[in-house]
């Protein structure tokens, strides 16, 4: 190579780049863990399942008042804010009418009881979740150990691709700091920060310590929760004995939330 | 090379600006803060890992905790002595170190780092307000 | 060659200053968005992508449109375009820079953007979009810069550049294909779920990109000593004519499939955009304006008499640019979100801060474009002299 000023500058540039690569690699390598003699384990009381699933007996819900305790239990415990501006709304569980919950299973002359019944909707924790396919950072992912569609709020870049991908409208985005919208903070559970997406987590934090999800606990038996792949689970018993439907089954996402109508 | 004086003057100005923080703060270094432990933390005598390790690596450890809890559904931490802890910043760390202002913030301010933990995780000192 | 960009007339500096001013104001608004969150935009839980992503989508098209001058020159040896390939490539660079900036301003947590590379996820189309967009930026910088430098030195460009030039052609197609895949692979979004979305995006891209290039050529001719050439402009005009016809044809195909099949999920979005739904008619006048503009464009461009008249051609290019901008920038994105998957209707309209940030991104792109064109034209004038 000719020794011009230009080429020497190029050489310097490339060398500087080379020197700066190692610290970057070191920084990533440090995440891999140290040899420090600690272990991480599942708790002894943790509930285990291949795929958590929920069966909702909608016949036991007659008015919005029947659903409210479930929603409140969830939203209070998980620090879900309540904003007046509908655009900024955040919800993990909410109420829909039949023809909104099941827009492609509706008919003009619907059974009256069903038409006015409040339907509880939430993240379906699909077995084949389109949101997880869409996420460019694996911030939302299908957890192998129990089938929960989880969110890693530390990793989410807020691109909202998952929200476009979800055919159930189950995801909410923090358009602003959620804290001013939370009437009473639960200091044992984190809030979210602005700019990340959130949704129902099937109460992963409770299953880990042997407890059922908040909504299930507050439902007086109207909700059942269990392992879809355990033939003896309550969920499977209910599925065996009742005709159930799921939301938008035709899309092949395989929702894990079943409705007895 | 008619531009010599301009180039040298330029370099001097650049160096002066570039090193500004160094000489501006010269001789004014604040003393390193003393960590204040709560009674609960004092009684426990040892953190989840030895003090030296915690001082240097608490952020990395928290990162690994998050990974284990969120991604692998493992929530229990067994330290080298065999003691078991729940991996939770909100409920384990901040339970003992409920004096965030004296324990976390002092040092973070001294080191001029602003970790975003507190955007989401809530300080437990205001528990009973 | 960068020195060519700093030697300019008062007018040039005035224009650059004006752009910098708009960028500065937009940047301040963006700081507010960083601080408050995306709540300052008109986006909502139902319409989660708005003006930013719509502009991004449109500009990917403009970037891809640059290939319409590269391809005939390098593949078919159409010599006339040799004069303006550099303009096409530099337009692509400016457009891709705007695309990337629009993505950045749309993120809720922009400081974490490198997570896309740290935790790369080949199953996500957005990951691939990042790859193809940055790749296209790199290719155009490499090819454009080196070919221009060779032209300035009066030599043929280096042989190693050839593979990159050929690669840049299919790459241009890939950027808009991948961008369409962002939308058309999503279950439960009937409006986008059509295999023709990528071709339709490309058709509107090959109309909007070259139309914009024609307008730029006219400006260049008027403000500098370099004339991009009558033949060149006419050839571009033919490309725009074909592309806009195909674009409207594809749209009509969509309308047929949706309405003849009579499947509600596919019809409902078109109904919302062109007729309104349950009294929600925010976008209806815009969408019809877009169709009318594209229609006028077709009439003016297909007819050789009007096409060859350059002042009419300018009008045709402006209406086509605006028509495709409305179609993609307003209709394509919010149209897919309204009604939402639960069939609730929540309309979207950008807010003032949102528009100001978008304007600043456009100004940034125009600034890059101005500087690059200044360099390119500077070289052309040198070579001419």
Image (tube, rainbow, N blue to C red):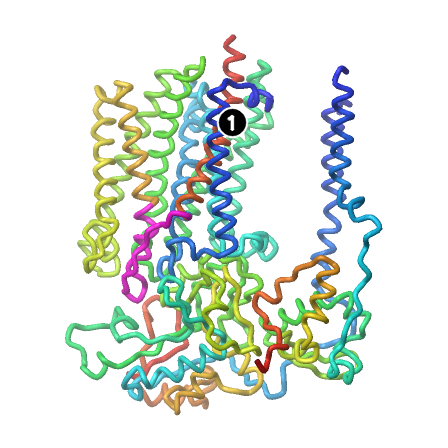
Taking the spot 21% from the left edge, 19% from the top edge, the residue there is C305
Q: Nearer the viewer, residue B27 or C156?
A: B27
Quarter of the image where the N terminus of chain B is located: top right
User: In this orientation, which residue lies closer to the viewer: C329 or A85?
Assistant: A85
Left or right, C150 with reference to A199: right
Queried whether the magenta region covers residue C126, the answer comes back as no
| Residue B39 drawn at (x, y percent) | 75, 83
Is B90 in front, or is A105? B90
Magenta range is C330-353
**Residue C335 counted in the magenta span:** yes
Circle 1 marks a residue in which chain?
C
Mark 1 crowd level (few <14, some 14–19, many ≥20, 10 Å Cα) = many
Q: Nearer the viewer, residue C121 or A231?
A: C121
Query: Image quadrant of residue A92?
Result: bottom left
Name which quarter of the figure residue C264 lies in.
bottom left
- Residue A16 horizontal/vertical position (percent): 75, 39
Quarter of the image for the C terminus of chain B: give it.
bottom right
Residue C74 in view in this figure:
no
Element type where label 1 sits in the image:
helix
Going by the image, does C342 lie left or right of C21? left
- Provide the residue designation for mark 1: C372
Q: Residue furthest left?
A: A109
- Residue C125 locus on image (x, y percent): 47, 53
Establish if B4 lies above or below C165. above
The extreme right residue here reads B27
Q: Residue at x 75, y 32 (%)?
A: B13
Write the residue at 35% across / 34% down.
C208
Position in image of residue C294 (x %, y %):
25, 36
Q: Is residue C12 visible?
A: yes
């Amino acid at each position: 190579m000719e020794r011009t000023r230009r080429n020497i500058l190029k050489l310097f540039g490339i060398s500087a780049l080379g020197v700066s690569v190692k610290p970057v690699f070191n920084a990533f390598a440090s995440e891999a863990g140290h040899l420090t003699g600690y272990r991480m384990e599942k708790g002894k009381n943790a509930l285990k399942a291949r795929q958590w699933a929920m069966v909702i007996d909608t016949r036991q819900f007659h008015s919005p008042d029947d659903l409210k305790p479930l929603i409140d239990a969830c939203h209070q415990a998980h620090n879900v804010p309540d904003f007046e501006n509908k655009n900024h709304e955040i919800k993990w569980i909410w109420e829909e009418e039949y023809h909104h919950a099941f827009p492609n299973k509706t008919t003009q002359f619907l059974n009256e009881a069903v038409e006015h019944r409040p339907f509880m909707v939430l993240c379906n924790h699909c077995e084949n979740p389109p949101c997880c396919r869409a996420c460019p950072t694996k911030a939302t992912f299908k957890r192998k150990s129990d089938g929960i569609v989880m969110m890693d709020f530390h990793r989410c870049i807020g691109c909202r691709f998952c929200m476009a991908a979800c055919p159930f409208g189950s995801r909410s985005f923090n358009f602003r700091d959620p804290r001013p919208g939370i009437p009473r903070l639960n200091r044992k559970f984190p809030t979210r920060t602005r700019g990340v997406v959130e949704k129902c987590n099937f109460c992963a934090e409770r299953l880990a310590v042997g407890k059922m999800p908040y909504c299930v606990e507050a439902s007086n038996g109207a909700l059942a929760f269990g392992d879809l792949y355990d033939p003896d689970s309550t969920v499977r018993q209910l599925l065996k004995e009742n005709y159930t439907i799921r939301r938008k089954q035709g899309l092949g996402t395989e929702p894990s939330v079943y409705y007895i109508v | 090379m008619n531009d010599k004086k301009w180039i040298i003057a330029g370099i001097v100005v650049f160096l002066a600006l570039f090193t500004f923080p160094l000489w501006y703060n010269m001789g004014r270094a604040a003393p390193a803060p003393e960590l204040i432990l709560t009674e609960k933390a004092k009684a426990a005598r040892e953190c989840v890992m030895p003090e030296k390790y915690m001082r240097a690596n608490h952020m990395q450890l928290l990162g690994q905790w998050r990974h284990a809890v969120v991604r692998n559904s493992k929530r229990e931490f067994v330290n080298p002595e065999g003691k078991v802890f729940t991996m939770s910043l909100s409920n384990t760390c901040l339970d003992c170190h409920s004096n965030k202002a004296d324990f976390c913030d002092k040092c973070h301010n001294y080191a001029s780092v602003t970790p975003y933990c507190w955007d989401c995780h809530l300080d437990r000192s205001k528990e009973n307000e | 060659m960068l020195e060519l960009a700093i030697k300019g007339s008062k007018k040039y500096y005035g224009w650059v200053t004006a752009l910098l001013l708009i960028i500065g104001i937009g940047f301040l608004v963006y700081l507010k968005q960083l601080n408050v969150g995306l709540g300052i935009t008109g986006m909502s839980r139902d319409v989660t992508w708005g003006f930013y992503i719509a502009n991004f989508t449109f500009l990917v098209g403009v970037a891809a449109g640059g290939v319409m001058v590269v391809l005939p020159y390098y593949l078919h040896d159409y010599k006339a375009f040799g004069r303006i390939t550099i303009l096409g490539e530099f337009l692509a660079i400016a457009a891709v820079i705007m695309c990337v900036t629009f993505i950045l301003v749309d993120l809720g947590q922009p400081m974490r953007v490198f997570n896309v590379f740290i935790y790369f996820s080949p199953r996500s189309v957005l990951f691939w979009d990042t790859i193809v967009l940055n790749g296209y930026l790199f290719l155009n910088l490499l090819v454009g810069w080196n070919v221009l430098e060779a032209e300035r030195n009066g030599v043929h460009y280096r042989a190693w550049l050839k593979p990159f030039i050929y690669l840049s052609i299919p790459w241009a197609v890939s950027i808009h294909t991948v961008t369409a895949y962002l939308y058309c692979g999503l279950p439960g979004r009937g409006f986008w779920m059509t295999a023709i979305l990528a071709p339709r995006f490309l058709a509107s891209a090959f109309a909007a990109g070259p139309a914009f290039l024609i307008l730029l050529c006219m400006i260049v001719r008027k403000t500098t000593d370099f004339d991009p050439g009558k033949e060149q402009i006419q050839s571009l005009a033919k490309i725009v004519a074909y592309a806009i016809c195909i674009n409207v044809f594809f749209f009509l195909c969509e309308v047929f499939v949706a309405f003849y099949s009579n499947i509600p999920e596919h019809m409902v979005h078109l109904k919302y955009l062109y007729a309104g739904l349950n009294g929600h008619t925010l976008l209806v006048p815009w969408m019809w304006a877009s169709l009318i503009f594209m229609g006028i464009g077709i009439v003016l461009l297909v007819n050789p008499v009007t096409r060859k008249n350059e002042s009419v051609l300018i009008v045709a290019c402006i209406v086509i640019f605006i028509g495709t901008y409305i179609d993609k920038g307003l209709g394509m994105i919010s149209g897919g979100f309204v009604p939402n998957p639960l069939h609730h209707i929540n309309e979207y309209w950008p807010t003032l801060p949102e528009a100001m940030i978008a304007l600043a991104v456009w100004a940034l792109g125009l600034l890059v474009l101005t500087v690059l064109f200044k360099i390119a034209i500077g070289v052309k004038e040198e070579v001419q002299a």
